[in-house]
Amino acid sequence: MSIDSDEARITILLERGTTGLGFNIKGGKDMQLLKGDDGIYVAKIKPDGAAAIDGQLKVGDRILEVNGQSLESVKHEVAVSTFVKAGASVTMVVQPGAEQAARKRHKEQGEGSFSKSALAAGVVALAVGGIAFFVYHRYRH
């Protein structure tokens, strides 16, 4: 899932505290949150952490860059490593509320759910299997 260039982006500067940046991430190329979406999203904001104290970063925000390094189409482990190596001052480009918007688009497009043709094929297979079961048990004696 690509980023729409018209969607809002903000830049956040966090000073790493004694407990780190104070948030967890989810997603990535190898751990997609939604099928076809390899973005990195904020999973949790830790109370009293740098992110909570700053107040700008929210659960569900998509992190696009860290200190100028893109997090687009990277594996989860690469994103974690990028944060670990980012230093004391971390500048992030973030797309607020992107997870909710992505889930809405995903639902509207029917991605990740059964298509009507797949559902119809399943119903037909179930019906044929039921008939075969009935015929087998009816005439096996």
Image (tube, rainbow, N blue to C red):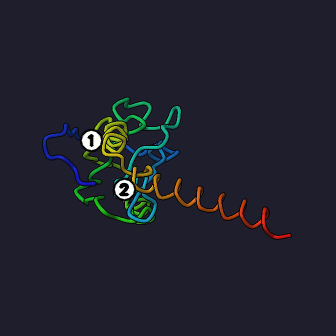
Identified at 37% across, 52% down, the residue is 40
Query: Can you say which quadrant of the picture contains the C terminus?
Result: bottom right
In this rendering, is residue 12 above or below 64? above
Label 2 sits on a secondary structure element that is: loop
Identified at 47% across, 52% down, the residue is 119
Left or right relative to 1: residue 30: right
In this rendering, is residue 55 above or below 105? above
Identified at 25% across, 60% down, the residue is 69
Q: Please name the residue that numbered disc 1 is placed on.
A: 95
Whether the residues at callouts 2 and 1 have beta carbons within 8 Å, the answer is no
Lower sequence index among marks 2 and 1: 2
Q: Which mark is residue 87?
A: 2
Q: Which mark is residue 6?
A: none
> Could you say where residue 28 lies in the image, as x and y percent from the top left?
40, 59
Which quadrant of the figure has residue 94? top left
Q: CA distance from mark 2 to mark 1?
A: 22 Å
Q: Amino acid at mark 1?
A: Gln
Left or right relative to 15: residue 20: right
Q: Amino acid at mark 2?
A: Gly
Q: Residues within 10 Å of mark 2 (few under 14, many from 20)?
A: few
Which quadrant of the figure has residue 55? top left
Q: Using the rendered image of the protein, determine whether residue 92 is visible from the camera's viewpoint.
A: yes
Identified at 46% across, 51% down, the residue is 26
Front in this rendered view, residue 46 or 130 = 130
Residue lying furthest right? 141
In this rendering, is residue 47 above or below 112? above
